[in-house]
Image (cartoon, coloured by chain):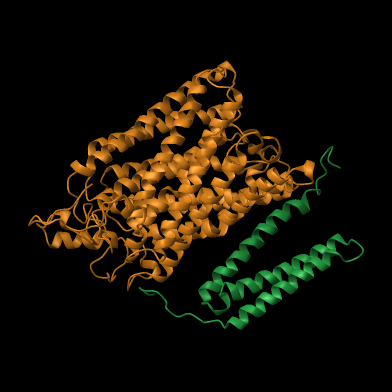
């Protein structure tokens, strides 16, 4: 418990920011490149694109948003965001995946 | 505006007289002044929403659509919903009472991010003005739910502009939520442990969790509707390859928890008022505190009960039904605990307490009728009828507005330094209670009989129930106007309140009324549990002769 501001802050070297930026650009090129893979595998393309997107998001959260250098409380809140996203996915997909378990007249 | 005067005639400094120029208000970073800015703004928007409601009730006096066309009726009820939900119900208690009280209750000088707090008001006003601009330029006719494909592909009304307004207002509440979370974590006074926090703070913490985790989802979802509408990119419209049920999932993922954004802060108010005017500790403090968190978490798992009849899987419906019943448990815990708090208490029937007692009855009716709608079978009959309209007004008006008015009266002496006139305030509370029930009880019957919502033509046999409902709305309107007059009157003419007119516990009552700009002369140190009314009562008896009004916590 405190009654003031936490003045502790981690100074990130500019080199780290530049490296993350370059990594993001490489991943961007990879996303575009993956879209041109021969064979038109929609599922595979989606998996690749989403995996790259997740990696990019994690990099932004850890470095640009300073979560890597933050307190455990910040980690908890950052994780809560993903946990809630998971809730949204699971319950929404729960609808889509079970919709055809009971055949509905005219929907076959 | 009130200015407290010390005994020797010297004007005491407080947040209200800290600056009297318009700029001193528009550029303030004082949480109390920002709360006043919000108070004025939400009251104005409430008046707009209220006038639209009166138009709806006027139209429904007769079975024919004779006051306005069907298209205009669609616009009027949509704008009533948009204004009331986004511009009044969601911000009302957190942005007015929460802004004013959270720092005071935790013993801090301000919120953690004062400039972000001011920014939240500007963003709210920008969103509100854009929504108003959309209203005066034709309005919007989709219902406040913006369901596609009608909203994205067919409506010729101001959908995009209204969505931009709602998007901005969402960010305003995110700013407030972040501010509350950080303040409650990092700026509590020495000795103020988590379980010494007032339940108002627990409620606002839980509300902030919902705001921060849920609002971005609806903001992006509404933006996707705008993107589909403007760029014809298929997301929700089946004709473009989209999925309209996906919109409903994403929309209700936020918009059902949004009900708890509206009701949880009201529950925080109820806990404070019921303890003060029963002169007792809140029964089962820990249960009430954790039930706020439970509501915030479970409230995110129930959204599918809005979609039982829209093509959602039966199995998903069963899970959502079960979870919806589960969320009733923590709400019931609170109601039972407040009732137990009153049991054998020294109850004072002040105006805020009247609102609290109204809240308890109305919230129970609203909650229990929610269980009808959470049951798959009964919902098939009741979905999209006036039963739903009555149910959610019992929660939002009977719950949130009663909580808001209870809180506004309870902390009015703290905010302004002046007492409101008790007699007329009690009368207004009774008029609002009577008007509310006359308006919405007949709507349960109408819905049960099959009257669909969002229609202005209806069979003649339902006219009597509609006339009762419209008469109730007129009474409710009178009840709402009264506080505007007597609260404004009290700013100059009300009796001076002193720091603690109710003899209440809590740090906000340990500083002047109105408080100084930095809230406390010295950082308070907390040494006792919350709501220690019994201890103070015993102390009063020991020091008999000092009078109840000096029993300052």
On screen, residue B446 above or below B234:
above
Residue B219 vs residue B62, the one in the foreground: B219
Where's the C terminus of chain B, which quadrant? bottom left
Q: Left of B126 or right of it: where is B73?
A: right
Residue B155, position as x, y percentages in the image: 66, 35
Which chain identifier belongs to the green chain? A
Q: Is residue B398 visible?
A: yes
Residue at 23%, 42% in the rendered image = B490
Q: Left of B215 or right of it: where is B194?
A: left
Q: Quadrant of residue B189?
A: bottom left
Q: Quadrant of residue B513?
A: bottom left
Q: Residue furthest right?
A: A39
On screen, residue B195 above or below A89:
below
Q: Left of B289 or right of it: where is B478?
A: left
Residue B166, position as x, y percentages in the image: 55, 47
Residue at 44%, 31% in the rendered image = B51
Residue B50 vs residue B185, the one in the foreground: B50
Q: Left of B194 or right of it: where is A107?
A: right
On screen, residue B313 above or below A71:
above
Which chain identifier belongs to the orange chain? B
On screen, residue B466 above or below B252:
above
How many callouts does the rendering have? 0
Q: Is residue B292 visible?
A: no
Residue B290, position as x, y percentages in the image: 47, 61
Residue B239, position as x, y percentages in the image: 79, 41
């Amino acid at each position: 418990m405190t009654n003031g501001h936490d003045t502790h802050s981690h100074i990130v070297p500019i080199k780290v920011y530049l490296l993350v930026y370059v990594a993001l650009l490489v991943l961007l090129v990879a996303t575009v490149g993956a879209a041109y893979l021969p064979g038109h595998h929609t599922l595979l393309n989606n998996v690749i694109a989403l995996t790259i997107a997740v990696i990019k998001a994690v990099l932004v959260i850890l470095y640009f948003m300073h979560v890597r250098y933050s307190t455990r409380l910040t980690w908890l809140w950052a994780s809560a965001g993903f946990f809630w996203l998971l809730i949204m996915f699971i319950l929404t997909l729960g609808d889509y995946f079970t919709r055809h378990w009971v055949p509905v007249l005219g929907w076959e | 505006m009130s200015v407290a005067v010390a005994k020797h005639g010297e004007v005491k400094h407080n947040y209200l007289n800290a600056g009297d120029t318009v700029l001193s208000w528009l550029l303030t970073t004082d949480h109390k002044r920002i709360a006043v800015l919000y108070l004025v703004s939400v009251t104005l928007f409430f008046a707009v929403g209220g006038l639209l409601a009166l138009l709806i009730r006027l139209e429904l006096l007769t079975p024919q659509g004779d006051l306005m066309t069907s298209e205009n009726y669609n616009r009027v009820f949509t704008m009533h919903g948009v204004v009331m939900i986004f511009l009044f119900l969601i911000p009302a208690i957190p942005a007015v009472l929460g802004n004013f009280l959270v720092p005071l209750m935790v013993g801090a000088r301000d919120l953690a991010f004062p400039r972000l707090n001011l920014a939240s008001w500007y963003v709210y006003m920008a969103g509100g003005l854009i929504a108003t601009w959309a209203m005066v330029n034709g309005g919007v006719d989709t219902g406040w739910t913006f369901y596609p494909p009608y909203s994205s592909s067919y409506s010729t009304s101001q959908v995009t502009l209204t969505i931009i307004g709602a998007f901005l207002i969402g960010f305003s509440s995110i700013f407030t939520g972040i501010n509350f979370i950080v303040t409650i974590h990092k700026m509590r006074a020495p000795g103020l442990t988590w379980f010494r926090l007032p339940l108002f703070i627990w409620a606002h913490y839980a509300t902030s969790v919902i705001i921060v985790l849920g609002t971005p989802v609806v903001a992006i979802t509404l933006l996707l509707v705008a993107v589909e509408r403007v760029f014809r990119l298929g997301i929700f419209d089946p004709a473009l390859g989209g999925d309209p049920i996906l919109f409903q999932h994403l929309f209700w993922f936020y918009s059902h928890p949004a009900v708890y954004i509206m009701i949880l802060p009201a529950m925080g108010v109820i806990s404070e008022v019921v303890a003060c005017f029963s002169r007792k500790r809140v029964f089962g403090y820990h249960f009430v505190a954790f039930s706020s968190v439970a509501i915030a978490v479970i409230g995110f798992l129930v959204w599918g009960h809005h979609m039982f009849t829209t093509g959602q899987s039966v199995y998903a419906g069963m899970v959502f039904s079960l979870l919806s019943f589960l969320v009733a448990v923590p709400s019931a815990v609170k109601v039972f605990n407040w009732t137990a708090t009153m049991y054998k208490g020294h109850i004072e029937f002040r105006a805020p307490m009247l609102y609290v007692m109204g809240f308890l009855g109305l919230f129970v009716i609203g909650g229990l009728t929610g269980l009808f709608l959470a049951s798959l079978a009964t919902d098939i009959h009741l979905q999209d009828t006036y039963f739903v309209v009555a149910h959610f007004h019992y929660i939002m008006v009977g719950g949130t507005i009663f909580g808001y008015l209870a809180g506004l009266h309870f902390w009015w002496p703290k905010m302004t330094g002046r007492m409101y006139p008790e007699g007329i305030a009690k009368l207004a509370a009774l008029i609002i209670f009577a008007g509310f029930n006359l308006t919405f009880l007949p709507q349960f019957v109408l819905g049960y009989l099959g009257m669909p919502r969002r229609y202005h033509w209806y069979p003649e046999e339902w006219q009597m129930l509609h006339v009762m409902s419209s008469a109730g709305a007129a009474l409710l309107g009178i009840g709402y106007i009264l506080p505007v007059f007597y609260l404004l009157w009290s700013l100059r003419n009300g009796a001076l309140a002193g720091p603690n007119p109710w003899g209440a516990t809590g740090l906000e009552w340990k500083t002047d009324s109105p408080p100084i700009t930095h809230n406390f002369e010295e950082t308070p140190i907390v040494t006792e549990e919350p709501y220690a009314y019994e201890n103070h009562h015993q102390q009063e008896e020991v020091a008999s002769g000092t009078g109840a009004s000096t029993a300052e916590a």
